[in-house]
Image (cartoon, grey):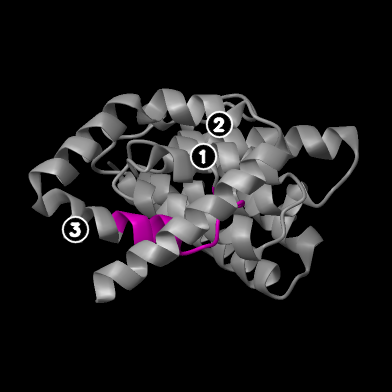
Amino acid sequence: MDYNELMDKKSLFDEKIKLVQMGNRAYEDKTIEKAVEAFESYLTVMEEIKNISKGELLPSQFDREKEVSELFVLSGIYWNLAKIYDGFSSIEEQEKFQHYLKKYILFSQEKPYQAICAAAVKRWIYHGRPVHCEAFQKAYQRLTDSQCFIVSSLVGFTQFKTLENLSQFKNQVLLNSPFGRKLVQVYYKNGPKWAQWMNAQPKSVRWLTARFLDFIAWICTYWTKN
């Protein structure tokens, strides 16, 4: 690599860092237009580097080991853009919301930071008051590695700690007895199809099921502590 090529690479690197910093600062300051401009400019730079068309970035275009930090940054940018466009109402803006959320899932799945991305979606569902809650719920189901299939399918309906409390009960109580291990085995075998069935139910049924699971989780927490 000659001197000019080296300087070009350094210039692109500096530009990308600057755009990420500008975007994050604008997002935190709630200057949304500036945040969108910075984030989308970053994506444009990456598309130019990879020599691809607009909107066609894919994880397969990156070295999974050498460019994992770049993949993580892109995942974060897609996440912020999905949250921003979630609040817009025009058809074009809603198409962008769907596009960026799909890209977030794509750049998060089967990556070392997938659990972090799933946790971010869960926090947004419970504390961000998303407009398209169902879309974020589906994103969470695709990103979570939890084997609490039914509770994961009801994220946003159950209380925030329900999944954590039930998982703790499984690890501390059920897995320590033959009968409990058998129950867990049966659940792991049937849980995915039960969760799929739950996803197809009306909101009223899902809400009632969530209240029941919240109650069960409360009993499990009391049992675990005592």
Vertical position of residue 56 compared to residue 159: above or below: above
Estimate the x, y position of residue 187 in percent, counting from the top left. Answer: 30, 34
Q: CA distance from mark 1 to mark 3?
A: 23 Å
The residue that mark 1 highlights is 153
**Nearer the N terminus, badge 2 or badge 3?**
3
The N terminus, quarter of image:
top left
Q: Nearer the viewer, residue 142 or 189?
A: 189
- Of 112 and 62, which appears nearest the observer? 112
Residue drawn 78% across the image and 69% down it: 31
Residue named by callout 3 = 173
Amino acid under disc 3: Val
Which span is picked out in magenta? 155-167
Q: Nearer the viewer, mark 2 or mark 1?
A: 2
Is residue 22 visible in the rendered image? The answer is yes
CA neighbours of label 2 inside 10 A, class few (<14), some (14 to 19), many (20+):
some
- Going by the image, does 82 lie left or right of 224? right
User: Residue shown at 55%/35% (left/top)?
Assistant: 103
Q: Are marks 2 and 3 in contact (CB under 8 Å)?
A: no
Magenta span includes 128: no
Please give the residue where the numbered disc 2 appears in the rendered image: 198
